[in-house]
């Protein structure tokens, strides 16, 4: 599929444009999802190149059926790139093309979380 690249290429391209931040969800509900990059943007006044590296991660409590369908539809592309690939948001297929708060995505076939999930309590 057109536009998919090794993740390293996407990160390198992003750094050539502006500071890069990796987006991770701050909530478990898609409606509450706020990229970590927003904190950088608000504090620095700089518009960073934001890469969502968690779009296909199977977080507990989050619906992930569409994510699984996306990964399945990209099986050949991902296999050709070692199981993980990146794409610019402007080139992304549906439903990724509707995300306007990120500049690129990392999609992977390895999406299971391992280890204990954080409790949200400070140690």
Image (cartoon, helix red, strand yellow):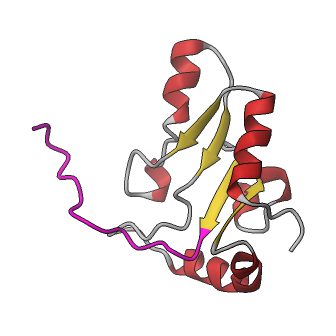
Residue drawn 56% across the image and 42% down it: 22
| Residue 113 position by quadrant | bottom left
In the depicted view, which residue is nearer to us: 14 or 67?
A: 14
Bounds of the magenta segment: 108-123
- Horizontally, is 59 left or right of 96 in the view? left
- Residue 104, image x, y percentages: 71, 49
Q: Residue furthest top?
A: 44
- Horizontally, is 15 left or right of 20 in the view? right
- Residue 35, image x, y percentages: 52, 41
- Horizontally, is 32 left or right of 8 in the view? left
Counting the numbered discs, the total is 0
- Residue 20, image x, y percentages: 64, 33
In the depicted view, which residue is nearer to us: 56 or 65?
A: 56
Residue drawn 48% across the image and 66% down it: 57
| Residue 66 position by quadrant | bottom right
- Residue 84, image x, y percentages: 64, 68
Residue drawn 47% across the image and 72% down it: 111
- Horizontally, is 36 left or right of 73 in the view? left
In the image, is residue 83 above or below residue 102? below
Residue drawn 9% across the image and 38% down it: 123
Is 115 a magenta residue? yes
For the N terminus, the image quarter is bottom right
Q: Residue furthest left?
A: 123
Q: What type of secondary structure mainly makes up the magenta span?
A: loop
């Amino acid at each position: 599929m057109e536009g998919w690249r090794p993740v390293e290429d996407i990160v390198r391209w992003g750094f050539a444009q502006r500071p890069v931040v990796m987006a991770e969800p701050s909530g478990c509900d898609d409606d509450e999802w706020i990229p970590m990059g927003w904190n950088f943007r608000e504090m620095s006044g700089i518009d960073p190149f934001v890469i969502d590296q968690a779009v296909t991660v199977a977080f507990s409590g989050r619906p992930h059926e569409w994510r699984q369908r996306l990964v399945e539809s990209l099986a050949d592309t991902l296999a050709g790139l070692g199981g993980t690939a990146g794409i610019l948001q402007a080139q992304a297929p549906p439903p990724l093309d509707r995300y306007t708060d990120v500049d690129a995505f990392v999609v992977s076939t390895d999406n299971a979380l391992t280890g204990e999930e954080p409790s949200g309590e400070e140690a």
